[in-house]
Amino acid sequence: MTTGQQEAPRVSGASSPVMSVIWRLIALAFIDAIAIVFAYSFWSGGLALAAVVLLVVTAAINVVFLVPGLYPLRWISPGVFLLMLMVVYPVMFTVYAAFTNYSAQHILSKQQVVERFERQFYTPEDQASLTWRAFRSPADEFLIWLEDPTGRQLIGDPQRGVIPADDYDAEFGQIDQADGLPTRIDDYVKLSRIESFRHLTALSRLDIRDEAAQLRIVSLDRAELGIQRYTYDPARDVLTDHLTDTEYESRRGFFVAEDGLRAPGPGFVDVIGPDNFLRVVHDHRIRDAFFGLFVWNFAFAFLSVAFTFALGLALALVFNDQRLPLKGIFRTLAIIPYTIPGFISILVWAGLLNPTFGPINAFLQEFFGISPPWFADGTLAKSAVLMVNLWLGYPYMLIVTLGALQSIPGDLYEAAEIDGANVFQRFKTITLPLLLVAVAPLLIGAFAFNFNNFAIIELLTAGGPANPNAVTPAGQTDILISYSYRLAFASGRGQDYAFAAAISVFIFAIVAMITLVNFRISRRLENMI
Amino acid sequence: MKLSIQLGALLVAFAMLFAACQPGAAPTPQPPADTPAPVDTPAQTPPAAETPPAEETPPAEETPPAEETPPGEETPEPSPSPAPGAEAGTLTIWAAGETADALTDIGATFTEQYDVPVQVYELGFGDIRDQLLLRGPAGEGPDIIVGAHDWLGQLTAAGVVEPLDLGAKEDQFAQVGVDAFTYDGTLYGMPYGSEAIALYYNRDLVPEPPATWDELKETARQLQEDGTVEQGYCLQKGDPYHSYPILTGHGGYIFGPDPETGAYNPDDVGLDSPGGLAYGNELNDLVAEGLLRDNVDYSACITMMTEGRAAFWMTGPWALNDFRTSGVNYGVAPIPMMEEQPRPFVGVQGMMVSSFAPNMLLAQSFLTEFIATDEGMDALYEADPRLPVWLPLAERVEDPDTAAFTESASHGDPMPAIPEMSAVWEHWTTAINLVFEQAQDPDEAFEAAAERIRETIAQP
Amino acid sequence: MASRSGKVKRVRRPELGLRARRRISILFKVLVAIATAIFALIPVAFVITAALNPLNTITAASLLPTRITFEHFETIFSSPSHPWPTWILNSATVAGITAVVVTALCALAAYSFSRFRFRGRRAGLISLVIIQLFPNMLAMVALFLLLQAVGQAMPTSAVVPVLGEIELPRLGLNSLGGLILIYSGGALGFNTWLMKAYFDTVPYDLDESALVDGASHTQVFRMVVLPLVRPILAVIGILTFIGTYSDFLIARIMLSSPENYTVAVGMSLFITGQFTQRWGVFAAAAVISALPIVITFLILQRQLIGGLAQGGVKG
């Protein structure tokens, strides 16, 4: 489709100086070295997918910069590099998440959940709760002085374990009258209760054992000799509860005993296969609502683009006129909607449109005697959504078209004017077609953006007004994404991210299909590519 | 973790990404077609050999404890550039709004007395919960968060908060506070303040607060008919929280009690119980009669109340500041009696320890030893005057507004913390909106809402 | 209306009523401009009202609050825990660098897509659009973890032969550098398209004659093409700057310490309260934070129409 307009430059020819090649090799070597360091970090941080993406992209960059035939790709590679990591990788992550059980109950990794279990201790019945006091050496080592309710005194030593104080072989300092403890043991100095505070984190990590039991400091005053309750065997993938002698197997993000009971604690993220996708297909709330949502969603996205583009274009034509007075000021005022964060504008609009208190209805009531119930009536709510979206979106179109208008050669107009074409003919035959060539991809992009414009629906109408007597809880301004995310986030047991991810994949399939069809039917686009 | 690599490899690399497109400023003919095959391999470059230490340094949490504590004896000052998450040795707290300011001051005192640096970060209220779920497991979270008790369902299900033992001090907290932070029989947080809605009224329009709901409606009707006010009694649309006392006052409920434990039972949804339907019809009648209006939201209510355009409104202590600054002559009274004792939702604020806190024991001790004291609780109350749950403080506070809220809260139900609640809010809101819009018969609207809540809860 | 340059004016032909028609057309355009300004400013006016209203609401029914107060502005500038000037500076830094990076990378890519014919070009262009269509709700989580890993691998300083030890920019979590990486990656797709379409309008003959004269592609790009596409560089710079400046969804997740916050994150502190939404302070902050963008646009917009002078060259 493309040939003709431009002859592709020959990708060969004069040899480059040796220096250029050497520089290139050194640069590539740097990049590779750094990529490997980062990939290793990703890998060890549990982001295997990101590591693979990074390495593949880096390898591709190497090839591109070493194979002369790929010269044109060199220009693209810096951008593609960023795009792959910051856009493509998150997409891959979402797709992966759709095959897991990632949700409110399954947030932690298996390792984290195992650690949580292994942190639990039980105290055998014959073990009493102990009081403790710490001694600290100049080298920041610690001894723990322990006393049980019967007055038996022990010393906990990370090297030697827990030993009765009388048997502990060391030089004890003076006995302090206040608490009956020595002021120091060897060069370990007693810490007051207040001083202990500062060292609590270090103290809580001391590994002091007495056979099977481990010394655990549970509060500023109390310590216990506890026994680790759970152990995990990675080889068998089994978690054992030593208190009840139960074995739990890992099953779909939980540790489950033979009788089906779960080990008490959170679940973990696990790959569960295509279940989330099946849920999307089988959920009647999605199936029954789909058609209605889709029609409005399509109309919403299409009309949003049409309106914003029309207004943006009209304004660009106006502001492009050199004779317009104060055009700098007007242009700036016109882009102001774009400078305010969208979420605040939407909330302000919700207030402006309030039928009872909003100034818009006050104005309409005053001059026209009407007071449209903006958010209670489906059609009006849809108009309100479109109008607010117009307000939010036209400055973007204005800036883009203002720029694109500059690309239209003035001579064309000259010729047309000489041929006697009037303003509208010139617009129809020159401005619009040439402009569309430049902005068509943006229009497609804007369509896709609005197709998934969750924020405006959620903040302005939250999908409302509700459909009375409907089979599904879809509201009248709900679009696919706002509706289905609400389903996923208010599901029975809280947020279900994996379900939302599966929905995302479905919606992506729909939008991508529409877009591809757009590309195909648009001859203009075919030509420009 | 200060590391150096030779030759500024990174800077060069990024520069090269650009430069490689334009190698050298000299007018070099492009492209180099007959470049010799590459002989260089990345592993031979010096920077690669130098960089590996970068990943070998383990994250702070894994280093042996002995190295954590600063080797120097006296290094009490907080680290100059605060790290995002908590670090061993520095107590890190996430809090919202004024509470964050108060905790910064409290933390400074703590640092002074105990030589432990405290770092307080201010986050948006809802962000605290959302970001704990993301940052906590990633090792970027805090030691302590300040939040609401009804997050517990979600936080415990995810496994990001740690049980807390208040020890002997538990007796000094109001029971409702301790109960609210108890989930599945385990205490997960230390409460410090609670809140519940009560009745605000305009003293200039209504000298004495109404004792019963009928009395309130009658007064509202009168004032509205006189044209004295725009709206006698304010209740915003789409706000289940604020209409809950009317639900309970008419005998309705959200979740019935579990027969065994008395906790909320998600299998017993009561929006379409006889009491629930009575509540729906009550709202419907009020709207039909013109006492309640569609389009009135929270902002509208606060504007009308503070400008004397409305006489009654039920809301919580958070609105006190607006009432006080507006200068309107207001009063606060308990919610008037309905067919049954109306019970508002009680929300309790408290502090929880993250399961990923590097300083877990320190955090727990900080709460039980330092915050759970008269001084700590006083400071929190001053910054964020919620109804105190620290009993010694509650006895001392004599503010009449606080007394009314406390009275109201004493009848309240703790806001359900179970995750199933998220299914309730949406459909309950929808039903209320349909009634406010007079778009559906109240019985049908609330039956449909209850049905959908059951359907959502039954989801896999 | 399409008379857009001196050139068109020159071909004025003796036609009856032409001047009158021009005058009507200008009058019409002024009216459109005024109407748009009103449409654009109505909500803004209410934000300003809310900023001056002692009540913390955003839906006051009248434009004129019953009492005017500057307390919200005072709150903003008196609170030590809310360093607004720093936040605004952070936002401007992030948005500025992102705009430069995006414009540069897009220009490089667009040159290639516009000037070369290679295999995969069409597929590449289409995938550039398609990939942006993904409703990326879990992207935050992925990006968060990615930045964390980047931050852990990133050294804090480097030793350069001549300069000695230098500080490296931080790229991980809670750093402006990391945020710039994310924004830059996200803004590339559509902007490359926009840029490429504009590049296509620069006639290839110009390149060709330069190439024949022995210029490299680098030189053609720098000396022939870039000067002619200045308006689109400005468009993409401005769009990226504004879009990045006002984002808070991503920044809120990635930044965690107040000295690194951007303005939008700072603002969100005031309205994400449970019931205590401080709309007044929020609105005041919105007014202040919008000012830099408005000023930037006032300055930069000349570039938008800068290509006009070169219209003749292009034809």
Image (cartoon, coloured by chain):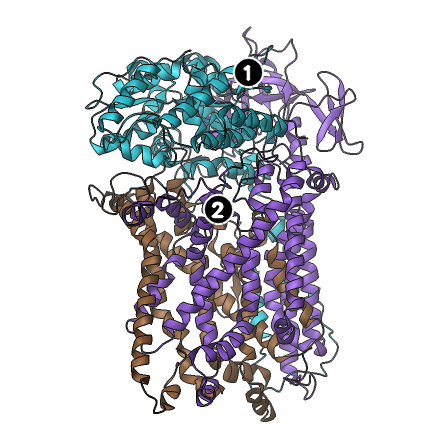
Chain colours: A purple, B cyan, C brown
Q: Which mark is residue B256?
A: 1
Q: Secondary structure at mark 1?
A: strand
Q: CA distance from mark 2 to mark 1?
A: 39 Å
Quadrant where the C terminus of chain B is found in the figure? top right
A387 and C171: which is toward the camera: A387
Relative placement, left or right, of B260 versus C307 is: right
Can you name the residue that lies furthest to the right here?
Answer: A236
Image coordinates of residue B197 in percent, x first then y, are: 37, 23
Type of amino acid under label 2: Thr
Image coordinates of residue A23 in percent, x first then y, are: 62, 76
Which residue is drawn at the image coordinates 40% and 68% (left, top)? A315
Image coordinates of residue A204 in percent, x first then y, are: 55, 27
A28 and B281: which is toward the camera: B281
Nearest to the eye among marks 2 and 1: give it: 2
B34 up-or-down from A437: above or below: below
Image coordinates of residue B400 in percent, x first then y, are: 26, 18
Relative placement, left or right, of A11 versus A488 is: right
B90 up-or-down from C3: above or below: above
Type of amino acid under label 1: Gly
Relative placement, left or right, of C185 versus B95 is: right
Mark 1 — on which chain does it sit? B
Q: Are marks 2 and 1 on the same chain?
A: no
Mark 2 — on which chain does it sit? A
B22 and C189: which is toward the camera: C189
C167 up-or-down from B84: above or below: below
Say which residue label 2 marks. A379
Which residue is drawn at the image coordinates 46% and 32% (left, top)? B433
Asked whether residue A169 is in view, the answer is no
Q: Marks 1 and 2: in contact by CB < 8 Å?
A: no
Q: Which mark is residue C205?
A: none
Q: Few, some or many C-alpha atoms within 10 Å of disc 2 (few <14, some 14-19, many ≥20)? A: some
Can you name the residue that lies furthest to the bottom here?
Answer: C213
